[in-house]
Amino acid sequence: MAAWLGRVSLGDAWYNMYSRLLRTKPVGSMAHSSDDLTELAEGSAVGLAKVLTTVDLVSLGVGSCVGTGMYVVAGLVAKAMAGPGVILSFIIAAVASILSGVCYAEFGVRVPKTTGSAYTYSYVTVGEFVAFFIGWNLILEYLIGTAAGASALSNMFDSLANHSISDFMITHLGTVRGLGKGEDTYLDVLALVIALVVTAVIALGVRNTVGFNNVLNVVNLVVWVFMIIAGLFFISSSNWEGGKFLPYGWSGVMQGAATCFYAFIGFDIIATTGEEAKNPNTSIPYAITVSLVTCLTAYVSVSVILTLMVPYNLIDGSAPLMEMFAVHGFMWGKYTVAVGSIAGLTVSLLGSLFPMPRVIYAMARDGLLFRFLSHVTALTHTPTVACVVSGSLAAVLALLVSLRDLIEMMSIGTLLAYTLVSVCVLLLRYQPDEQTDTHQFDSEVQDMDSLKHEDAKDDQILTENDGSSSYHTGRTEGEGDDSDFHTGHASLLKRLLGGHYYTLRLRLGMPDVSVRPTPATGRIVTRCTLSLFFMSFLLWSTIIFGVEQGTGAGAVISGLMATMMAGSLGKLLIMIIQQPESTRSLPYMAPCVPFVPAAAILVNSYLMLKLSPLTWARFTIWCLIGLLIYICYGVWHSTLELNAREQQAHASSYQRYDDHLDDTFSPGDDLYPQEQDERPYQGWSAIF
């Protein structure tokens, strides 16, 4: 009996544990109709100010990318990883970013109050622990990005001074053991000062930050055009000939793509500042698209000029774009690029430091980090405490760690965060709506009716021609095909497949348009999505470490295992598309769901596994520190935990007063029995 009671107690403890870890934040609590701190009324709490326009968001996104990505990452990747193949590395990284970017755009519209970016997105879908994990690693990426920007500016000034600054530091302060591959580095006091100055600028307020950012972006744009035009006079095609274009092979290109991915983090800052945008529903998708296209154009053009002007093995690692003109004796061009470097690296530094305190603010507001970090100053409407703390940590990191080591550490947390955003979008598309808004439902019906009338004639012709009338038998009279509304890619498939469109839908087992998501179908999609997420890592691990690096029979066996896993991934996708989608209408929706989110998961997981083992070791240490903070503080002080305790206390009080009542009989129970499938939907935690 005691053993049985012990098992029951252990089961209850396990249930309570995973219920805490997987509890989700209601989406409605972050809608504009909720208690929005940004609407400052007399006597209300101080919150973030809505001052950002679409142009401001584009400027923030482009500025945060083009600085470090163009002036530092392009040269380092070309020299040490990919050679002139860095062009392909940037294109591959851009494709991965676009796949994640459309998912970010949908979530930015779905949850407009998006301070915290991927952290907030995951909190409303996959649960509290995963949200903390993503937010914690976003903080790491912004810390590294800020430190790398400060270190890059310091190296640029050092290059202009003919390395006299670094020589002075080494002579008077000595060297310290680096945190990277063991090489010595000097204490970069100048980088420390730069990081602290930019922290002060960020703390002054978002409007001052954005205005300063816009001016620097104009300077950076002018210098970029100058570099492309002036560089055309010094290019030599011999730098790409004789196998010099891919000196490290495709493996080097993919490794370079994993590092270059960080150069496209600009759309993340756009999503992070959604709470401060005037009109996030339209501004966020537009700004993300423009930022990605602009950054890709800048990186590819600069990489082409750089690798055609200077052989890849002679590229200067600390200031590649400045020194490419110095090699040809064009010193006026070097100093012009220096002006652009100052502007570009400064705005990139602002772009890295700007979202970091806002992620900390969002996590502290939810109680997952220490509450004092969520304080917002009434004068500037910025999370000043979070700004000071995060900026100081980044300054210390810039002081102690070399630029090369920082560049290698950049991408892993960002890739994981973007992967989880794709998972979140995939989950939400197939979950039943917890609440139905009458006005929204009416608007959806109108949208579907318009689509029905638009495609009724084509649908009738196609149905008669392909003979698949059985597909439509489940419809009520007058009901057309509204799959365009659901998937976003049906109209394209109709044009491409013609009369075979409905035959394909029938053979794949896609649901009828009258079917709506249920808790059961939502759980199926959840299980399939989780399996797809973990199997993608297993698949690429088998390919990278078994097929690419293996030999003989081992490589053959690994190839067979990879083939079976690829087939399993395809089966999971088919299972997902066989489930009904939510009919909720949004101003912007990611196209081709579930294929685009699945492709983002696959590409991002591959790039993560191409990063060095040392990067994974640092990542593991950081995660262990975060896990300790969450277990000791976050899980007990989160807003959801405090609300649950308060509700439990109220329930206990009512139970004491009602103990003497006998309510075991209820006439309604016999008259209206509740079906098992109609129980309240428990979301993510209901999969267990």
Image (spheres, grey):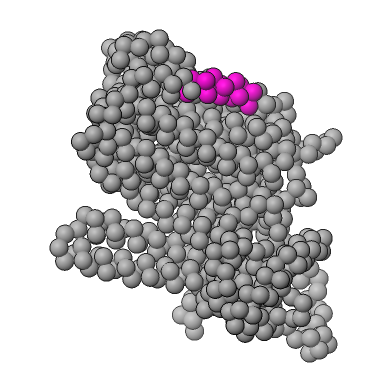
Is residue 497 in sight in this rendering?
A: yes
Task: Tell me residue 228's x, y (percent).
Answer: 43, 24
When the figure is inspected, residue 407 is found, relative to residue 211, above or below; the finding is: below
Q: In the shown orientation, is residue 581 left or right of residue 190?
A: right
Q: Give the residue drawn at x 65%, y 28%.
A: 206
Q: How many marks?
A: 0
Q: Residue furthest left?
A: 552
Is residue 626 in sight in this rendering?
A: no
Task: Tell me residue 566's x, y (percent).
Answer: 37, 66
Task: Tell me residue 48's x, y (percent).
Answer: 70, 35
Q: Nearer the viewer, residue 443 or 490?
A: 490
Q: Nearer the viewer, residue 37 or 488?
A: 488
When the figure is inspected, residue 318 is found, relative to residue 594, above or below; the finding is: above
Residue 343 forms part of the magenta stretch:
no
Question: Main SS of the magenta segment?
Answer: helix
Q: Nearer the viewer, residue 302 or 533?
A: 302
When the figure is inspected, residue 356 is found, relative to residue 173, above or below; the finding is: below
Q: Give the residue drawn at x 58%, y 45%.
A: 117
Residue 216 forms part of the magenta stretch:
yes
Q: Give the residue drawn at x 47%, y 27%.
A: 67
Q: In the shown orientation, is residue 273 left or right of residue 99?
A: right
Task: Tell me residue 582's x, y (percent).
Answer: 66, 66
In this picture, which residue range is highlighted in magenta? 210-224
When the figure is inspected, residue 683 is found, relative to residue 317, above or below; the finding is: below
Q: Give the residue drawn at x 63%, y 74%.
A: 462
Q: Quadrant of residue 672?
A: bottom right
